Each structure stands twice: as structure tokens, then as C-alpha cells.
Amino acid sequence: MAGRAMAINLAPTYKVTSFDVSDLALELLNQKNNSIKTIKSGLSNYSNYNSMLAGFYFMISAVPGFMECKFLRWNLPLRYCLINGNWVKQKQNLH
């Protein structure tokens, strides 16, 4: 839910791509803003990050807490500009 709100807010200014394992989450995002590119992908397959993220300049993460540590550990060596959205204080009226 936090990731969807961030994607919707960034889409008018930036090209946004959203990765999610859930078809429902991706469909809800497309209903809100169909300019956001969606890719069905389980982010728990950390070894695919290098190929999945090729071509992106920065990432904003909103992965569940149980994935956070591994997600950050696998992404730091890739040297992307990374913002962990779970650490950013969210306003309640974003979506």
C-alpha cells in the first residue's frame, strides 16, 4: 500500500516502474494510474536484482519488514540510489 501511494505520487514527474508479486496489487495500481509500468516479480529472488534493475537510476523500496534487511544487503553492492520508503514518514491522505 505504501509503495502504491509513492508510485502514484511520483508518476506525474518521473517514469515509474512497480514490481510486485501480486496481480491484484498491480491491477489496483494500473486502475489508479495506467502510465506506471508494472512488472510481476517476486523480489525475494535476490540474485536476479542485477538483471531486473538494469537501466534504472534509483529505487524506492516499500518491501515488507521481513524482507527489508536482505533486500538492502543485496541492493547496496549494486550501487543504486536507494530510498527505503518504509523509513519515510507517510501522510495518511496519499491514496
Image (cartoon, helix red, strand yellow):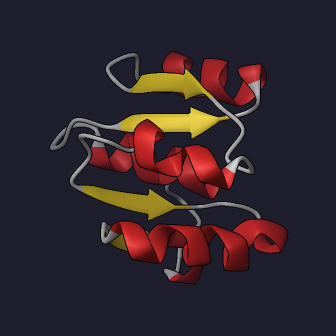
Query: Picture coordinates of residue 22 (x, y %)?
Result: 76, 29
* Residue 91 appears in the figure: no
Q: How many marks?
A: 0
Residue at 62% x, 51% y is: 47
**Residue farthest to the right?**
66
* Foreground pick, 83 / 9: 83
Query: Picture coordinates of residue 52 (x, y %)?
Result: 46, 38
Residue at 30% x, 66% y is: 80
Where 73 sits versus 51, above or below?
Answer: below
Residue at 63% x, 67% y is: 71
* Foreground pick, 25 / 50: 50
Where 16 sits versus 49, above or below?
Answer: above
Query: Picture coordinates of residue 25 (x, y %)?
Result: 70, 30
Instruction: State which quadrant residue 46 falls in.
Output: bottom right
Report the side of 16 relative to 13 (left or right).
Answer: right
**Residue farthest to the left?**
13
